Amino acid sequence: ECEFSGEVFVDGVDTKTSEFYEISKMVSSVFQNPKTHFFNVNTTLELLFYLENIGLSRYEMDKRLTEMLNLFPIEHLLNRDIFKLSGGEKQILCIAASYISGTEIIVLDEPSSNLDEENIKVIKEMLVQLKDKGKTLIISEHRIFYLMDIIDRVFLIQDGKIKKEYTKTDFMKIPSEKLNELGLRAKAKVNITVPKIQNKGSFRIKNIEFKFGGENNKLLIKDISFEMGKIYGIVGTNGLGKSTLLRCLIGLERKSKDEVYLDGKKLSKADRLKISSLVMQDVNHQLFTDSVMGEVSLGIKNAEIDYVEDILKKLDLYELKDCHPMSLSGGQKQRVVIASILCKDSKL
């Protein structure tokens, strides 16, 4: 439940006394998780879904589809299975669907959150095109470097309130140190340098081989070692096989051919599953209970309350311990899953 007070008007229409379908004719949304946007399996049907619902003629639908393709050359995404699209392709489809709806206002909730650098460039170009078309864009983000050429105003929200409003000129003058204090990311893309893997340690991949279904390419990893207690980054573009590698590594992929050792002992898939935990890209798939406290201690025999509460405090989740996990923000959900893994105390 929530309490709503005050008034919100969209183009003079009171949202509190209006039906959703009336607001939808003025405002369209692009969600943080594009999966929650879709109603169809076929991409073209998804693009036309809203237009069918408001009763447009076939001629008008074809006309809008053609206009959209002139603006966004995404013919390669038409008549595709939505479930087989990459994360970036799904987000591109959502933005295209928002444009084809004909609304003058488009609200985007962290549209870059699951995208690689190349797809962020594509999304940015789409937003530039929408702005040039005169569309009003309202974007909620914490990754801000790709928006600096687009923005006109910036509103800083803290503790549930708009603390400050900046013009573009004033916002660009804020030094990086001040941005960090406000909890914001950099205004320009940051290049980081990290040491290369030393290829030593007690956890060793002698071989991992996984063939992707219906394709000639495969994942092949040989002779890599990791030190326990260290943090390693596996980087690459969307759809390259990073998630598959992780699933093979911890023994989740049955079709994987692998040889993995710890302290010189070969580990079977079952052995690796026992010592491993996984935080999935979409954490909604691994939240099961009706409270944060219950989620974090799920499956742990004789969980010590003090220990669990200490972990919740360290991850800034203690005040939410009685909340339903699905009511939390995306970042809070991720921290809940990480907290449950800390309680499980997995080696990997």
Image (cartoon, grey):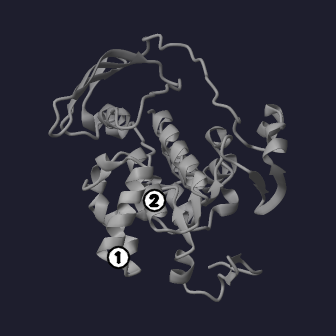
Side of 8 where 249 appears, left or right: left
Callout 2: 10 Å neighbours few (<14), some, many (20+)? some
Q: Which mark, residue 4? A: none
- Rendered-image quadrant of the N terminus: bottom right
Q: Amino acid at mark 2?
A: Leu
Q: Amino acid at mark 1?
A: Glu
Position of 340 relative to 2 (above/below): above
Seen from the viewer's position, the closer of residues 162 and 320 is: 162
The residue lying at 41 percent from left, 80 percent from top is: 54
Q: Mark 1 vs mark 2: give the one in front.
A: 1
Side of 118 where 147 appears, left or right: right
Seen from the viewer's position, the closer of residues 169 and 317 is: 169
Position of 239 relative to 287 (above/below): above
- Please tell me in which quadrant of the rendered image residue 177 appears: top right
Where residue 126 sits: x, y (%)?
51, 48
Count the numbered circles shown: 2
- Please tell me in which quadrant of the rendered image residue 267 appears: top left
Q: To which residue does mark 2 refer?
A: 287
Helix or strand or loop: what does disc 2 sit on?
Answer: loop
Q: To which residue does mark 1 refer?
A: 52
Position of 15 relative to 227 (above/below): below
Where residue 111 sits: x, y (%)?
54, 51
The residue lying at 53 percent from left, 26 percent from top is: 231
Circle nearer the N terminus (1, 2):
1
The residue lying at 47 percent from left, 65 percent from top is: 289
